Image (tube, coloured by chain):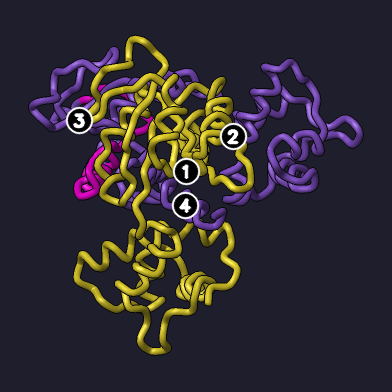
Chain colours: A purple, B yellow
Amino acid sequence: MAGYVSEAVIKRLPAYYRHLKELEQEGIMQISSQGLGERMGFTASQIRQDINSFGGFGRQGYGYHVTDLRMHIGHIMGVDQKHRMIIVGSGNIGTAVALADSFPRNGFETVALFDNSERKIGSRIGELIVQDAAGLKRYLDENTVDIAVLALPANCAQEVANQLYAYGVRGFWNFAPVDLKVPADAALVNVHLDEGLQVLSYRMQQTR
Amino acid sequence: MAGYVSEAVIKRLPAYYRHLKELEQEGIMQISSQGLGERMGFTASQIRQDINSFGGFGRQGYGYHVTDLRMHIGHIMGVDQKHRMIIVGSGNIGTAVALADSFPRNGFETVALFDNSERKIGSRIGELIVQDAAGLKRYLDENTVDIAVLALPANCAQEVANQLYAYGVRGFWNFAPVDLKVPADAALVNVHLDEGLQVLSYRMQQTR
């Protein structure tokens, strides 16, 4: 049984998932906490502690069964289910998300793309036609959508998120450079690409 | 004098910076640890502890001077300096980074864009013409570049990073879905957009 899974472990789950997938592709079926740790840059004890916290999977002397553990982590994260996404905002980021093939490959399928600019409505991005954002409510009345990707300017992102919440959306992936707030029964990840660059800048100063 | 700044605090620095910038824009000049905490979703004591760890700035009863603290944090992160970036890979992500206006606004200027696809070399993206990746060494011999943005497939990202390191690049912002490794005198941030979606999927399960 999974105990309390800490926020730090949650943020590491995708890395576990990715490394286990790579191991599968390399034909590796079993791996020790030591081996997985070396690969991921963690200690064996950290690996054991993390994995224990969501289910206690390894067997002394056997290590972890790669596919079982990958599937278990995928199930915990819910990435063994399909997710239907809409993208609001068809600028550079919205377009990049719409055209990326890695998201649908992992079960996150973009089903519609919206914008409020006359210039963009009706244009084609990949296999999608940009729809008028004025039609969002109607679209969400008629279609099931799990996640809204917010690829909008900072100054309207919260308002759009509030509307989408009112229309029933409960998952938000926000690229606007602002920390959005959503009610407790909704989930939100703020991306903040700029902050990655600032952390990089910090690290570059330290290595100089 | 700044003491040891933990990895967790480093990752929070950009959020401090962003919130302090917003406060400046709102004309707020002074703020208590309590007020800043409420805004950022931390306790006052966490705010004080964080800020103490990089310099001890507040004064009992006065709180923090917003602009001084913002500039201090900007200086720690090195974002008060200009950074020259090249982008390697002119696909969706490379294009989005090249066209985003938030990066140059924060001092991260894209000076060149490279690809190895005949179809893309010579095409225009914003104000840049896509150059042949075969010319990277020569370009780096003749130009100062601080950061390489790697917007490449996973299977060639490490090799390209190794080459760029050999040509003198010491900062890497990696969008390929793989954990790159760089020598200790270089700095690296791996973005992993996919992982944000997986964390979102996890949180959506928890709120259901």
Q: Nearer the viewer, mark 2 or mark 1?
A: 2
Residue, disc 1 = B207
Q: Is residue A12 above or below residue A18?
A: below
Name the foreground residue: B68 vs A142. B68
Question: Viewed as shown, does residue A7 lie left or right of B152?
Answer: right
Residue, disc 2 = B179
Asked if marks 3 and 1 touch (Cβ < 8 Å), the reply is no
Residue A45, percent from left and from top: 79, 47
Q: Is residue B83 visible?
A: yes
Q: Amino acid at mark 2?
A: Asp
* Cα–Cα span, label 2 and label 1: 30 Å
Residue A148 position by quadrant:
top left
Q: Amino acid at mark 4?
A: Val
* Cα–Cα span, label 3 and label 1: 23 Å
> Which chain's residue wears label 3?
A
> Which chain's residue wears label 1?
B
**Magenta part of the chain:** A139-165
* Cα–Cα span, label 1 and label 4: 30 Å
Quadrant where the C terminus of chain A is found in the figure:
bottom right
Quadrant where the N terminus of chain A is found in the figure:
top right
Question: Viewed as shown, does residue A43 lie left or right of B142?
Answer: right
Q: State whether discs 2 and 3 lie on one chain.
A: no
* Cα–Cα span, label 3 and label 4: 36 Å
Q: State whether discs 1 and 4 lie on one chain.
A: no
Residue, disc 4 = A199
